[in-house]
Amino acid sequence: MTTSPIKGNASRHHKRPRGEGQWALGYHEPLNKNEENKKNDDGLNVRQRIIDIYSKRGFDSIDPADLRGRMRWYGLYTQRKPGIDGGKTAILEPEELDDRYFMLRVRIDGGQLSLEQLRVVADLANEYARGTADVTDRQNIQLHWVEIESVPDIWERLEAVGLSTTEACGDTPRVIMGCPLAGIDQDELLDATPQVREIHDRFIGDPAYSNLPRKFKSALSGCPAHCTVHEINDVAFVAVDKDGEKGFDLWVGGGLSTNPMFAKRIGVFVRPDQVADVYGGVIGIFRDYGYRRLRHRARIKFLVNDWGVEKFREVLETEYLKEPLPDGPAPVEPRAHRRDHVGVFPQKDGNFYVGFAPKVGRLDGDRLHLIADLAEKYGSARVRTTVEQKMVILDVAPDQVDGLVAELEANDLKVNPSTFRRQTMACTGIEFCKLAIVETKAAGANLIDELERRLPDFAEPLTINLNGCPNSCARIQVADIGLKGQLVDGKEGFQIHLGGSLGVNPGFGRKVRGLKTTAEDLPDYVERVLRNFESQKKDGERFADWVQRADEGDLS
């Protein structure tokens, strides 16, 4: 079992001046504005103020500490005021960037949706969000243009079908990612759905875990393709087989942003019935020992990196679990380079699943309704989101597959997409995000169209990830071609990272000195590099491996 928050820990350790603001070492006074706001009032408490005050009195009634802080605890961020160019992002004050509308993030733990849930999200998108509905690379759905007056009704209707926005953002345990094929994949080691649900029910919305140093990202899967990208999550449980017993391997401390680190194997074997307790121990360590002084160091990856695996395991076992965990095996290598579950594949029950690729995750309410209608027409009651901004329809009978595929394809929901459609992701970008410097969604869609036209026969696995700022929401450092938004010669453009990868040989992308491109010239640049790759690659060589040996001139 986990320990209660902070109590008892401070008495076991000497206080030290300032330090990193670690509660367990006796320092409880806030060292920055974010910590002060959280100490003054738990983020979970903002819900009632939204219902009772802000939704009735309007945007101007919102306390600034709630507006730019605590409302994130319920998935709400003010979106960017239209017309503010990227050069102003780091210059203007928050109130100058704020629009009077919100992005609202619906958390979809494990990526699991019933048709009823999908239709409710679609209705809310059309009624309150000008039709917007983007699938994210953490399996959520984001709405935009939401007004504060609408939020209570949105919550009521989401919660009536088992969805919520609770702790979809903020310094909290955010959505728990899971394999969209959990329970149906022919080759999965374990169906982790019960563990995802137990973690959600025990920890989400619990005030004991609602004031973490910063955000906390989780993944839990038995997927043989390792689709939940465990290498870059704060905590991840990866299914393994230990001498015939199925369980999980624990990884802690992954994360990207401006200081990327891969998660580290703790080396323990976790039985399925232990997962929630171990999760609570890890999140408890982060709460109590996590760094709170400097915001950019307030992620668990810095603590794990400083402590090392041996100390982290010792503290987990002795202070939080009160029992040792056995050593365990590492996961087997992933079965494929592509982790998105796009295409038609058999389930273990004789039915099929059909994965399809919306362009850079961009959908809308009408298309969500269409997806639900097609799923129902062809016999499915379950739809899933993936961590690659894609979707999957489950439980399609063999004689219904061709009809479903034909209708999805006819509606530009590609089941057999090009590499470029299949493996290009884009973050929200300057259209809505206050941190962004450049536009991403339209740039990504245009890049896909241009590359399909110019390189129609290119079939190698290749990830292209576009991010509007340095924070790497779209995972630029682990993409084959990672594009970090910045101004280039006064125009919107990208710094280029090449050859990032996850899986068998994980590595962060190579940065070639001065390698940048404007958004306008981006298709020309990518085409040029891919033609060089095609002419120089060895048999079976991946793009990421070629990048490591290529001359800089061939990458420019």
Image (cartoon, rainbow, N blue to C red):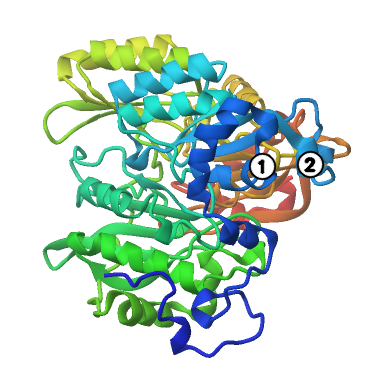
Per the rendering, the mark at residue 296 is: none
Q: Residue at x 66, y 80 (%)?
A: 18
Q: Residue at x 45, y 12 (%)?
A: 366
Left/right of residue 491 with respect to residue 224 in the rendered view:
right
Q: Is residue 155 above or below residue 203?
A: above
Q: Residue at x 76, y 48 (%)?
A: 515
Question: What residue is pinned by disc 1?
Answer: 63
Does residue 11 appear to the left or right of 93 in the view shown?
A: left
How many C-alpha atoms fall within 10 Å of the one at disc 1: few (<14), some, or many (≥20)?
Answer: few
Going from the N terminus, do you reach mark 1 or mark 2 first? 1
Is the Cβ of the residue at disc 1 closer than 8 Å to that at disc 2?
A: no
Give residue 480's position: percent from left, percent from top.
56, 46
Q: In the figure, 158 relative to 38: above or below? A: above
Q: Which residue is mark 2?
A: 89
SS of the residue under disc 2: loop
Q: Nearer the viewer, residue 497 or 215?
A: 215
How far apart marks 1 and 2 lie (CA) works out to 23 Å
Residue at figure coordinates x 74%, y 29% from the top left = 81
Q: Residues within 10 Å of mark 2 (few under 14, many from 20)?
A: many
Rendering coords of residue 77 (x, y %):
60, 38
